[in-house]
Image: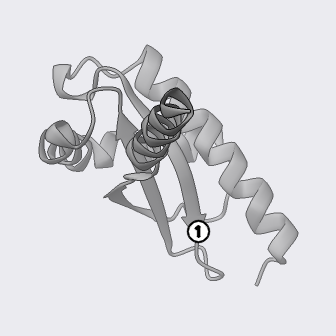
Amino acid sequence: MPSGIRIKRIEDRVQQELSELLIHEINDPRLRQVFVTDIKIDRELAYAEVYVSAIEGAERSVEVLAGLESASGFLRRALSARVELRTFPKLRFFWDPTPENADHIEKLLAELRNKK
């Protein structure tokens, strides 16, 4: 079993490579302006939980996740060629609401500052 530091390095590398794949090699219109916010890989390297978000927000979440699921085989194959692991983890995609929540909090704080 890999150490926590090694898993973190693998997660960072997979996130970098997946982001590049989404920008340069995926032509699916459902996956335009999508970014990878985080990746969590389990200790057995069996599953990689990929957290994504889009500029437009949660209204595109179903569309984006469907596009990623349909491209998951291609993405896994392309990632396994770029990141050398004995077996590459299966990709699971999840919507990450963090950027939207942060934007909402920023707006609330700005309103509070303007009321002073």
- Which quadrant of the rendered structure holds the C terminus? top right
**Residue 108 pos. (x, y %):** 44, 42
Q: Is residue 98 above or below residue 87?
A: above
Residue drawn at point x = 27 percent, y = 36 percent: 57
Q: Amino acid at mark 1?
A: Ile
Residue drawn at point x = 43 percent, y = 35 percent: 107
Q: Nearer the viewer, residue 12 or 62?
A: 62
**Residue 12 pos. (x, y %):** 71, 48
What's the image's color scheme? one colour
Which corner quadrant of the image does residue 113 belong to?
top right
Q: Is residue 82 visible?
A: yes
Q: Is residue 41 above or below residue 103?
A: below
The residue labelled by disc 1 is 41
Residue drawn at point x = 56 percent, y = 52 percent: 38
Q: Nearer the viewer, residue 97 or 40?
A: 97
Q: Within 10 Å of the Cα at label 1, are there few (<14), some (14-19), or many (20+) other Cα atoms? A: some
**Residue 1 pos. (x, y %):** 76, 84
Q: Is residue 71 above or below residue 28?
A: below
Side of 20 relative to 77 (left or right): right
Side of 26 relative to 108 (left or right): left
**Residue 81 pos. (x, y %):** 57, 40
Q: Nearer the viewer, residue 115 or 92?
A: 115
Residue drawn at point x = 42 percent, y = 27 percent: 22
Side of 83 relative to 74 (left or right): right
Number of marks in picture: 1
Q: Secondary structure at mark 1?
A: strand
Q: Is residue 84 visible?
A: no
